Amino acid sequence: GGRHRVQQCRQVEKENAQENAPQMIEYASTAQIEQAVNMPGIRGAFYPCAGYLDFSKFHRRPGNIALRDRETGAVMLFARHAPHVYEAHFAFPQSARGKKGIEIATAMINEMFASGGACVITGAPPRDNHAVRIFGYRLGFRPTGAFFVLDGVEYIKYELRKHQWVVS
């Protein structure tokens, strides 16, 4: 049925991402993170009321990892919350959206599960940001049932577990 086709599609995306990963993914520097998160259309998704976002302390926290796509400059931040547990944040420009974005994010998640020490990756997109929620769902993230409100915005907790992903 439909669920089987979705699983087949995700497996193909994982295999494609794994084949492309060595040449497309690198660890991101602080300057590369700041360039990505401060792009027009992205900064507001991180902190709607903020000015320039300073990520100079991101790499100072033990275990935090940032991965970057060399071609598009897309960055995925993995903030370590506990051993083997990371919270993911996407900073993908327009050129890294849709199918290309799925490929890039899949390669980054493969890297985290295969080499980054992750067993669980969480996320918390705003309830109103349907595009980000659908993007996460296509990657395999599922709602946990938990939510929180910050500065009047409701966020829904999602997670992806390594045993559900099956690193290719």
Image: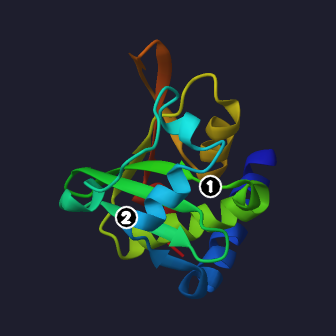
Label number found at residue 30: 2
In the foreground, 165 or 100: 100
Q: Residues within 10 Å of mark 1 (few under 14, many from 20)?
A: many
Question: Residue at position x 49%, y 26% from top?
Answer: 49
Residue 10 visible to the viewer? no
Q: Amino acid at mark 2?
A: Thr
Q: Quadrant of residue 42?
A: top right
Q: Residue at (59%, 62%) from the top-left corner?
A: 74
For the point 69% across and 68% down, the residue is 13
Answer above or below: position of 10 versus 12.
above
Whether the residues at callouts 1 and 2 have beta carbons within 8 Å, the answer is no
35 lies above or below 111: above
Image coords of residue 139 (percent x, y): 61, 53
Task: Label 2: state its secondary structure.
Answer: helix
Q: Position of residue 117 (x, y in %)?
A: 29, 68
Any mark on residue 42, and which? none
Q: Position of residue 6 (x, y in %)?
A: 74, 53
Quadrant of the frame with the C terminus: bottom right
Vertical arrangement, residue 164 with respect to residue 18, above or below: above
SS assignment at label 1: loop
Residue at x 60% of width, y 51% of height? 39
Dot 2 alpha-carbon crowd within 10 angstroms: few under 14, some 14 to 19, many 20 or more:
some
CA gap, disc 1 and disc 2 = 16 Å
Specify whether 64 is left or right of 146. left
Q: Amino acid at mark 1?
A: Phe
Q: Is residue 95 visible?
A: yes
Q: Nearer the viewer, mark 1 or mark 2?
A: 2
Would residue 60 be found to the left or right of residue 130 on screen? left
In the picture of the structure, the residue carrying the numbered disc 1 is 92
